[in-house]
Structure formats: C-alpha cells, structure tokens
C-alpha cells in the first residue's frame, strides 16, 4: 500500500509540469511577427506597404484624422495589391471617403484597415515621422499604440499578424 501512494506522489508533479508546459507552448506567439500594413516613402511619395499573408489580404485602408476626416478605399471584388500610393485608388478599388488628399504638417493621423474581416493594427503617425524614414524603412504598429520603424526586408519576411 505504501508503494501505490508513492507512485501517485511521483507522477502527480510530472503530470502537472507536463500540463503547464503544454499550456505555455500552446500560448506562445511567434518571435518574429509582421503587420499586414506599414507606411514608407519612395521618392518623396507616401506608400502604404501591404503584406499578403495567405487569407490575410487587406480589403479596406483608411488614413484618418482625430477630427473624423478620412481618406478611405475599399477593395471590394478587385485583386489584392502589394502597395498603395497614398491618396491614389488602385484599379478596381473604390474610394469611399476623400475628405483630404494630402498629409498636412503638424496633424496626427492613423492608418487603419481591415483584413479577413478583422481590424488591422492602427499606425499613428505624422508627416514628420514619415519624413524621418530611411530608404529601406517601414513604420508599423508597435506596442501600446506607439509606432515602430523596421527594415523593409524584415517587414516582408516575418510571420503575419493583424
């Protein structure tokens, strides 16, 4: 009888540790994540860089101000694209809001969008923050609403997240 109780004692901690480890592994997120959207500049033009991530193709893009003004486009049934030049509508897409057609100095903006029906992480930016970007840099959503700058190659090669 003493051995039976001892076996339970020895296997109980091992079983608990195994369950904890499985729980931790199931909740892990990839170390390398990428946003489905980012902002960059090419030859002085603001470009919204998009990542195709399997089913996560961006269907709506908006640049919004705190005053409620927006420039917004919707893909509808058109083909997904890799990049969108800000304030230009890709072939087949529809412009659904065009309260402004250029970025102004000293204005806070938010780049928002939807992919696979879910909202993509918003990127808060100003025209000045875009002017600071290097030629191979992309502004993406960071922690706690603060944007972060990443290398274009890293932006395009890591695992996708909204």
Image (spheres, rainbow, N blue to C red):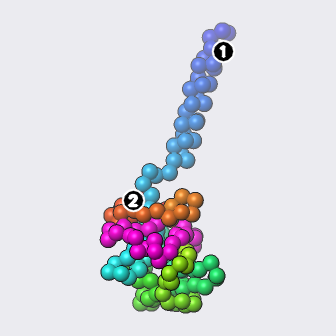
* Earlier residue among tags 1 and 2: 1
- Residue 133 lies in the magenta-colored region: yes
Q: Quadrant of residue 45?
A: bottom left
Residue 5 badge:
1
For the residue pair 104 and 139, the one nearer the viewer reads as 104
Q: Is residue 140 left or right of residue 69?
A: left
Task: Note whether 82 is above or below 91 in the view shown.
Answer: above
Q: Quadrant of residue 53?
A: bottom left
Quadrant (top left, top right, bottom left, bottom right) of the N terminus: top right
Give SS at disc 1.
helix
**Number of marks in the rendered image:** 2
Q: Quadrant of residue 160?
A: bottom left
Q: Is residue 160 left or right of residue 98?
A: left
- Residue 67 lies in the magenta-colored region: no
Q: Is residue 149 left or right of residue 76?
A: left
x%, y% of residue 88? 44, 88
x%, y% of residue 38? 44, 70
Give SS at disc 2.
loop
Inspect this view and state whether residue 119 appears: yes
x%, y% of residue 158? 39, 59
Task: Note whether 63 is above or below 37 in the view shown.
Answer: below
Magenta stretch bounds: 114-140
Mark toward the viewer: 1 or 2: 2
> Which residue position is annotated with label 2?
158
Task: Note whether 26 is above or below 17 in the view shown.
Answer: below
Residue for point 48% across, 87% down:
102
For the residue pair 148 and 91, the one nearer the viewer reads as 148
x%, y% of residue 43? 32, 81
Q: Would you call the spot at circle 2 few (<14 residues within 10 Å), some (14-19), or many (20 or more)? A: some
Q: Would you call the spot at circle 1 few (<14 residues within 10 Å), some (14-19), or many (20 or more)? A: few
Residue 46 badge:
none
């Amino acid at each position: 009888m003493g051995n039976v109780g001892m076996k339970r004692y020895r296997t109980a901690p091992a079983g608990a540790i195994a369950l904890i480890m499985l729980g931790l592994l199931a909740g892990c997120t990839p170390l390398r994540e990428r946003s489905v959207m980012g902002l960059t500049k090419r030859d002085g033009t603001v470009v919204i860089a998009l990542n195709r991530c399997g089913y996560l193709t961006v269907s709506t893009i908006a640049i919004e101000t705190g005053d409620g003004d927006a420039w917004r486009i919707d893909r509808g049934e058109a083909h997904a694209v890799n990049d969108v030049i800000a304030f230009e509508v890709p072939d087949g897409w529809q412009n659904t809001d065009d309260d402004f057609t250029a970025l102004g100095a000293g204005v806070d903006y938010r780049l928002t969008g939807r992919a696979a029906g879910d909202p993509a992480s918003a990127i808060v930016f100003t025209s000045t923050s875009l002017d600071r970007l290097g030629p191979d840099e992309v502004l993406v959503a960071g922690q706690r609403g603060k944007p972060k700058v990443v290398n274009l190659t890293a932006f395009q090669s890591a695992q996708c997240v909204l």
